[in-house]
Image (spheres, grey):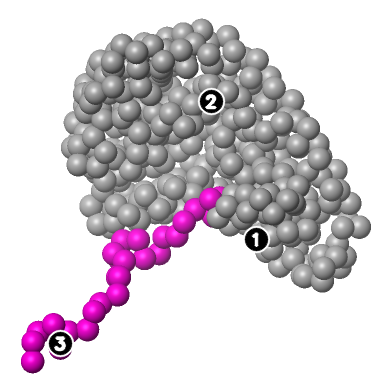
Amino acid sequence: MTINATVKEAGFQPASRISSIGVSEILKIGARAAAMKREGKPVIILGAGEPDFDTPEHVKQAASDAIHRGETKYTALDGTPELKKAIREKFQRENGLAYELDEITVATGAKQILFNAMMASLDPGDEVIIPTPYWTSYSDIVHICEGKPVLIACDASSGFRLTAEKLEAAITPRTRWVLLNSPSNPSGAAYSAADYRPLLEVLLRHPHVWLLVDDMYEHIVYDGFRFVTPAQLEPGLKNRTLTVNGVSKAYAMTGWRIGYAGGPRELIKAMAVVQSQATSCPSSISQAASVAALNGPQDFLKERTESFQRRRDLVVNGLNAIDGLDCRVPEGAFYTFSGCAGVLGKVTPSGKRIKTDTDFCAYLLEDAHVAVVPGSAFGLSPFFRISYATSEADEGRSFPFKTSAAYRH
């Protein structure tokens, strides 16, 4: 009898590192909403975190020019010198931060920056403190890198912001990173200098803990809010802070896939090792476009932010006019994170009882044809996220469930 005859064919066995990780809930909801649209249903999608504005013309022209100049080859591993210089100037001009070129890294989106940082620094069991609600990829990236996410609930009573007391209580000898996002996806909450200061004082007392800050929504803030980033506020933490940003949101360049960061050169060098064995360099054309975005005119940012603020006000007012919902006014980004505890226990017109925020979002999609994302996807219930990076006309049409008449006890 041959060996082949005695051995059964094995089915695919996923690696244990991804056994508890699934496809993003946001992507699942988007796929379902897209399928409903194909069926002819008038679905309004308020789930994706993507500006509806187009990439600025001068940025697109820079990409076209780079193509015609033949800049279609591999570039330096973690960013062209031209883009790193533009990033260095941006950090100095807007944040008062001085980085050398070897303290800057560029990758295929900010998500890869986060992945590179975690992969380069975490040993099995190392802890990463993540306030919730949080962007869904944060904890999954930590899991894949064999770290341990330590999720700290930060509800509306604290403005969805981490407090110094909660941070102090969460730090252990295994804590490697604290991950902060301001303005936040999904809550739109932002940390002022006064909000950050107590947290930074805690970190100064724990020199083994590093800080990763995701500043992706830096330019989208409202009502005169003054953006600040921690390394700018506390230079004593700069040598253990990774400041992450990108061109996706402010410049409407989500599909160009360029993220960047500034940090200690030893960390940046280790992240380059990870990137060298994963994707190598980012797109040469996207990098050329990003140089134009960072170096070019910035005046359109104010106009776009004013548009987002009008949309924010429309959505917040609409939500707070609905029985059972409670929406905090966000300081930035283009999301609302509304409480829906007041509708739990009610029954939809089709006879389904709403037990969770997931049930409520399913009702909105299937019955009202409005796609939003439950707070459970972001680590905090019962809430739901709306992305108002869409047309005001669609947002105005998205409240067909305005009164309690839409469901009953």
Pair 2/3: label in front: 3
- The answer to which of 220 and 57 lies nearer the viewer is 57
Residue neighbourhood size for the residue with mark 2, other residues' Cα within 10 Å, grouped as few (<14), some (14–19), many (≥20): some
Amino acid at pointer 3: Ala
Whole-number angstrom distance, CA of label 3 to CA of label 1: 49 Å
Question: How far apart are the alpha carbons under marks 2 and 1?
Answer: 29 Å
Q: Which is in the foreground here, disc 3 or disc 1?
A: 3
Determine whether 282 is above or below 318 in the image. Answer: above
Q: Which mark is residue 5?
A: 3
Tell me where residue 44 appears, x and y as whole percent: 72, 44
Q: Which residue appears at 77% of the width and 70% of the height?
A: 352
380 versus 226 height, above or below: below
Mark 2, residue position: 252
Q: Position of residue 296 (x, y in %)?
A: 46, 8
Q: Tag on residue 114?
A: none
Quarter-of-image position of residue 177: top left
Percent coordinates x, y for residue 7 in the rendering: 17, 84
| Distance from the alpha carbon under mark 2 to that under mark 3 | 57 Å
Specify the segment rendered in magenta: 1-27
In the picture of the structure, the residue carrying the numbered disc 1 is: 358
Q: Residue at x 35, y 17 (%)?
A: 67
Which amino acid, by three-letter code, is at mark 2? Ala
Q: Main secondary structure of the magenta part?
A: loop
What residue do we see at 24% from left, 23% from top?
73
Q: Are marks 2 and 1 in contact (CB under 8 Å)?
A: no
For residue 320, which quarter of the picture? top right
- Is residue 395 one of those drawn in magenta? no
